[in-house]
Amino acid sequence: MRQKLLTFSKSNEQQIRNIFNLKEDLTKSLLLDWQNKAEQIEISVAEQQVIDKLFHKIEYHGRGWNKAEKKLKLVSVLVELVDFDNLELDIRARYDYFLEADYGKLKLEGKVDIAVISEFPHLLLNISEYDEASDNDSVGELLAALLSVQKYGQNPVYGIYVLRQMWFFVILKNQQYSISKAFLTDRKAHLDDIFKMLKVQKEIILKTIQDINS
């Protein structure tokens, strides 16, 4: 029987739920550890200066940014400020990263806007373009990508999708997933929180690799 191909960009949430028997954790308990650790993160003076400058840009220009501008002027600034890259452990942030996974009769494949990887992906980030005429599904697209990472034996797997000025943090563990509330980049406190959530991911990735190597 011919294998069916499902690309990330053509995936929708209900379809992915049905195919992989996924259920959403509406209590958001899967996110508690990530969020609790973020509350303990301190932002340095130098980091805060960059974030404050970024916030002023968002205030004046953010609503008009298209996907390419948002990726360059906002998302990549925060990702590079966290500085995931680690030469010793071969961790790096990759842009326009291709993923695929074979699920027998079904193959998943596609690109994510940013992936933090070592020998395998750790964190995926997608930037969605809001278009009422489009059938793109931000959640379905990210879930398909996260399921591809699960094939590497990663569990849980972490992702983020950005829609307009909103950031959503996502965890997929076994067949259950949870989506955070919206973090709005035009709110200063939320922008700080987004950065803290990213910094926690750096800690999680380092611990994951150290556990593997120990």
Image (cartoon, grey):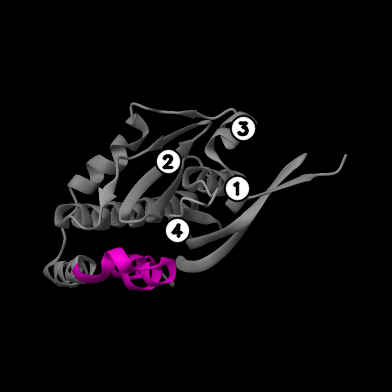
Residue at 45% x, 68% y is 92
Q: Nearer the viewer, mark 3 or mark 4?
A: 4
Q: Residue at label 2?
A: 171
Residue type at mark 4 is: Glu
Task: Name the kind of residue labelled 3 in the image.
Answer: Phe
Label 1 – label 4 distance at C-alpha: 22 Å
Q: Amino acid at mark 2?
A: Ile
Q: Which residue is mark 3?
A: 20
The secondary structure making up most of the magenta span is helix
Inter-mark Cα distance, 3 to 1: 12 Å
Say which label, 3 or 4, has the lower sequence index: 3
Residue tagged 1: 148
In percent of the image, x 62 and y 57: which residue is there? 110
Decide: is 171 above or below 159: above
Q: Earlier in the sequence, mark 1 or mark 4?
A: 4
In this picture, residue 28 sits left or right of residue 108: left
The outermost residue toward the right is: 1
- Residue 47 on the magenta span: no
Residue 182 location, quadrant: top left
Q: Nearer the viewer, mark 2 or mark 4?
A: 4
In three-dimensional space, the C-alpha distance between marks 2 and 3, rounded to whole angstroms, equals 15 Å
